[in-house]
Image (cartoon, grey):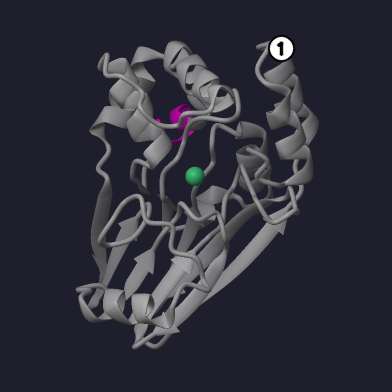
């Protein structure tokens, strides 16, 4: 049996990530998967990236915020997001990222896959079709049927919607661990999941754990970043 820790959408919230790592002992896992969005909206992008950069047995992909940061660093114009309070966070992050962490981000794919024995597993930020698709658990069933039908994978591990869920459609397992660092459901606790795969059984369990939100608020204040984010992290709501 393989035990896999599923993480995603950390959004530079290292205090939330650290709380998970402290509570679950990452060495117990055969593999740690990160579905992307390491960066933006909190002030610890370097600490977050560094942790994965220095660790073996991880599978990481880029999220939309990471891809935008790389585009800014290439000197390209930032078309989206349009809201100034969001743009500030992107520019702040791109200025603060250390070269070794930029290099690491550049080395990551947009999506990837691997096998555990006969089981094929795809890792996506959005979906198999579109890295920017937010696939919510209550999306029309047709959407899940279509993804299952076209899929070479028995397990899809996804991020981006920030909603934790586990659904089996036409024999395909769709898993979203939720967001480590930026939940939208009014519960500010960090979200993650544990996937267990053996030849007989696939099982998924979701968890929520509290973390010191005040550390994130302090980081934002010390860097004179928009107040809206402090409120967002305190309430666990998407306010922008
Ligand atoms: Fe995200």
Taking the image as shown, residue 32 lies to the left or right of residue 228, namely left
Q: Is mark 1 within 8 Å of ligand 1?
A: no
| Residue at point 49%, 23% (across, down) | 87
Q: How many marks?
A: 1
Reply yes or no: does residue 17 show up in magenta: no
Q: Position of residue 226 (x, y in %)?
A: 67, 21
- Between 32 and 29, the residue placed more toward the observer is 32
The quarter of the rendered structure image containing the C terminus is top right
Residue at which label 1 appears: 222
Q: Mark 1 Cα within 10 Å, few/some/many (few <14, many 20+)?
A: few
Q: Position of residue 2 (x, y in %)?
A: 41, 68
| Residue at point 25%, 72% (across, down) | 153
Label 1: which secondary element: helix
**Main secondary structure found in the magenta portion:** helix
| Residue at point 60%, 28% (across, down) | 42
Q: Can residue 202 be seen by looking at this rendering?
A: no
Taking the image as shown, residue 187 lies to the left or right of residue 26, namely right
- Between 12 and 53, the residue placed more toward the observer is 12
Q: Which span is picked out in magenta?
A: 49-54
| Residue at point 69%, 56% (across, down) | 185
Residue 112 sits above or below residue 43 on the image? below
Reply yes or no: does residue 52 show up in magenta: yes
The quarter of the rendered structure image containing the N terminus is bottom left
């Amino acid at each position: 049996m393989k035990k896999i820790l599923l993480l995603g959408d950390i959004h530079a919230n290292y205090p939330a990530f650290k709380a998970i790592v402290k509570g679950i002992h990452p060495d117990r896992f055969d593999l740690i998967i990160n579905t992307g969005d390491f960066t933006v909206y909190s002030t610890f992008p370097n600490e977050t990236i560094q942790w994965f950069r220095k660790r073996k047995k991880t599978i990481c992909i880029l999220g939309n915020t990471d891809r935008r940061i790389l585009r800014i660093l290439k000197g390209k114009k930032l078309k989206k997001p349009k809201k100034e309070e969001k743009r500030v966070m992107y520019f702040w992050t791109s200025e603060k990222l250390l070269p070794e962490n930029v290099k690491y981000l550049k080395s990551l794919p947009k999506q990837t896959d691997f096998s555990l024995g006969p089981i094929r597993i795809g890792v996506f930020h959005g979906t198999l079709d579109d890295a920017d698709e937010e696939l919510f658990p209550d999306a029309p069933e047709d959407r899940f049927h279509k993804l299952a039908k076209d899929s070479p994978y028995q397990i899809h591990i996804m991020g981006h919607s920030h909603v934790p869920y586990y659904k089996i459609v036409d024999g395909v397992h769709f898993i979203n661990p939720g967001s480590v660092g930026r939940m939208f459901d009014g519960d500010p606790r960090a979200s993650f999941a544990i996937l267990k795969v053996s030849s007989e059984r696939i099982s998924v369990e979701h968890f929520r754990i509290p973390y010191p939100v005040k550390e994130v608020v302090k980081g934002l204040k010390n860097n004179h970043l928009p107040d809206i984010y402090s409120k967002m992290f305190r309430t666990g709501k998407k306010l922008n």
